[in-house]
Image: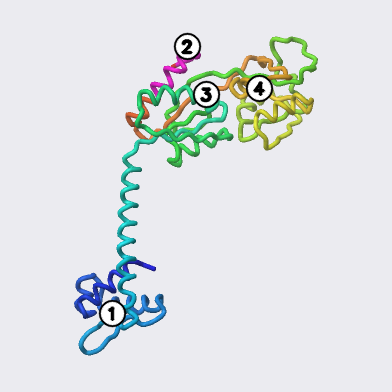
Amino acid sequence: MDSKKIEILMKTVELGSFTRASEVVGYTQSGLTHLMDSLEKEIGFNVLERDHNGIKLTEKGRELVPAMREFLFASDNLEKKIQEISQNKSEEEVVRIAAYASVAMHWVPEIFYRYKRICPDVGVDLRMVDNAIEPFELLNSGQADLIFASKQDIDYCNWTPLYNETMYAILPEDYPLKDHNVFPVTEFAGKEFLMPYGKFDLDVYKILDPKEIKMNVKSFMVDDETVIRMVEKGLGVTMMAELMIKGRTKNVLAIPVSPYATRELGMATHIKRKDTIIILKLKKCILQYISEINPQEAS
């Protein structure tokens, strides 16, 4: 039931006249009459008596007065609490980040640890994604303030390169290698190729398409770890980036591809949004971390 209607009802009874009440509450007299008729229909019985002396509550209406006052009091408290929470939420600074699972696992915990030491009052909201394009979509829709992703042909980003990940062929342990140091990408031709899902095939095809290599592609809606374990069981081969396979190469071969290939990992903010102080501090923290793990490639 609408608390506003109850409030207007009480004011109307207090003034004893639709005419006077309409002037106070900002309704026309006919509009106010319609509103009270609607309220009585919701209640299920008449609460107002109308005669030449004005209006007053019916006996049933008078019985409702204590409950209506209690309802208005509770409604007012609810509104105040909502405003209080909303104001507190808006005052709290939060950085919203979207990152690939591999980056979230291997980089983000240390970056967050360092960032919280310099910005202890800033909240951090991390969204881990398993789709190569999703971070950019979240950034463009305003659901993320900063993203970690591999470089794509997208024009609304302030892109900062961070790290060039080596690309590896992932092979069964008994794969007959001609060279244990490199794996020619041409050898993927005709093989059962387990394609990483979630648009990460974009990174794979950037390397293989120029060579016009045709594989027997098998796509599965599973995570990186599961694809690697499928390779272990001899169900095919695949190609993945360095952080995707880190700590997961037990019982498989991980050989850098030839010609040597990488995918560029970076961070991005939206080109139409000016970086806030807290975002600038986060970027500085990220760049410092990258300079320590890979000084040659840090920006």
**Residue 270 shows in the view:** no
Q: Nearer the viewer, residue 74 or 293?
A: 74
Q: Nearer the viewer, residue 243 or 6?
A: 6
Residue type at mark 2 is: Pro
Alpha-carbon span between mark 1 and mark 3: 66 Å
Alpha-carbon span between mark 2 and mark 3: 15 Å
- Helix, strand or loop under label 4: loop
Q: Earlier in the sequence, mark 2 or mark 1?
A: 1
Disc 2 and disc 4 in contact, CB within 8 angstroms: no
State left or right for residue 33 relative to residue 98: left
Residue at x-position 33% and y-position 52%: 81
Residue at x-position 31% and y-position 71%: 66
Colour convention: rainbow
Callout in the foreground (1, 3): 1
- Helix, strand or loop under label 2: loop
292 inside magenta stretch: yes
Alpha-carbon span between mark 1 and mark 4: 74 Å
- Helix, strand or loop under label 1: helix
**Badge 1 local density, few (<14 within 10 Å), some, or many (20+)?**
few
Q: Which mark is residue 248?
A: 4
Q: Earlier in the sequence, mark 2 or mark 3?
A: 3
Disc 2 and disc 3 in contact, CB within 8 angstroms: no
Q: Is residue 173 above or below residue 48?
A: above
Which SS type dominates the magenta stretch? helix
The answer to which quarter of the image holds residue 200 is top right
Residue type at mark 1 is: Ser
Q: Which mark is residue 265?
A: 3
**Badge 4 local density, few (<14 within 10 Å), some, or many (20+)?**
some
Q: Is residue 253 above or below residue 86?
A: above
- Magenta residue span: 283-298
